[in-house]
Structure formats: C-alpha cells, structure tokens
Image: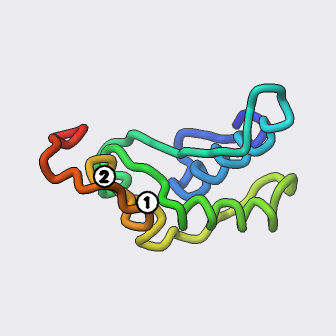
Amino acid sequence: MNCAEYNSKERFENAMYMVYEAKRFSEKADGVGPITSLLWMSPATYVTEKIGIASTSGLALLETIYQKYRQQGSVSIDPFPDDFSFSAASPDPQHPTDDQSDQKPLLE
C-alpha cells in the first residue's frame, strides 16, 4: 500500500483496490494462495456498514480492475455497485448456506 501511495484521505473504492492489488502481488510469495476474502471495518460515515465483506461479485469486479490496471501506479476507481459487498451480519446472497435462522448473528 505504501508503493501505491495510500493516504488516509483515499476514497473507499481506491483503498479497496489497493488492498486487493497488494494481496494479488503477494501471491508470488510462498504460502500465499489465490483464495481471497476482503473484510473491512470503518466508521459508519464512510460506508453503510461498519463491518463489511466483499461479495463474490465484488471480488470479481476487483479482479477485472486488477487485470486492466495492474502495475500502472495511481488508479481512480469508479463508485462500486450495490452488490459489491454485504454486511458481516448477513450471509452473501450469491452463496446461500444452510438455513441459519436459529443461529445468533456474529455481530449485533
């Protein structure tokens, strides 16, 4: 992230891309595989959830952006679509799991 010149005023989309890009670059190291999960915590003023998880389509969007812009330095990412992420308290609608209605949510 230091190489991408991240700063604390970075837009959410650009910061998420920088994290994804850093993860993809790190896959060259032993022990870092291709499976990616992207979670974040933020003040509620920046995104609707305080804790969020990139959805399958969100990760696919980041991969598309990565394939287009990797190693080009600074990139300005357009706002993410609504299905980019989901709340950590809700399952990914693209990957339904067994009925968990009787289980307490991880976060309340």
Disc 1 from disc 2: Cα separation? 10 Å
Counting from the top left corner in percent of width and height, residue 27 is at 79, 38
The quadrant holding residue 13 is: bottom right
77, 56: nearer the viewer: 56
Q: Could you say which is closer to the camera, residue 83 or residue 75?
A: 83
Residue 11 falls left or right of residue 90:
right
The amino acid type of the residue labelled 2 equals: Glu
Q: Please, what secondary structure does the residue beneath circle 1 have?
A: strand
The kind of residue on which mark 1 rests is: Ser
Q: Are marks 1 and 2 in contact (CB under 8 Å)?
A: yes
Nearer the camera: disc 1 or disc 2: 1
Q: Which residue is mark 1?
A: 85
Q: Which residue is mark 2?
A: 49
- Decide: few, some or many residues near mark 1? Use Cα within 10 Å; few <14, some 14-19, many ≥20: many
Query: SS at mark 2?
Result: loop
Q: Quadrant of the N terminus?
A: top right
Residue 31: percent from left, percent from top: 76, 26
For label 2, count other residues whose C-alpha is less than 10 Å away and answer few (under 14), some (14-19) or many (20+). Answer: some
Residue at point 51% right, 54% down?
12
Coloration of the structure image:
rainbow
The residue lying at 41 percent from left, 71 percent from top is 82
Identified at 51% across, 68% down, the residue is 80
Q: Earlier in the sequence, mark 1 or mark 2?
A: 2
Residue 57 image point, x, y percent: 54, 67
Q: Nearer the viewer, residue 6 or 39?
A: 39
- Up the image or down, 105 lies above or below 56; here it is above
Q: Which mark is residue 25?
A: none
Q: Quadrant of the C terminus?
A: top left
* Residue in the image at 59% along x and 59% along y: 59
Judge left or right: residue 62 versus residue 53.
right
Residue reaching furthest to the front = 98
| Vertical side of 62 occupied by 32: above or below | above
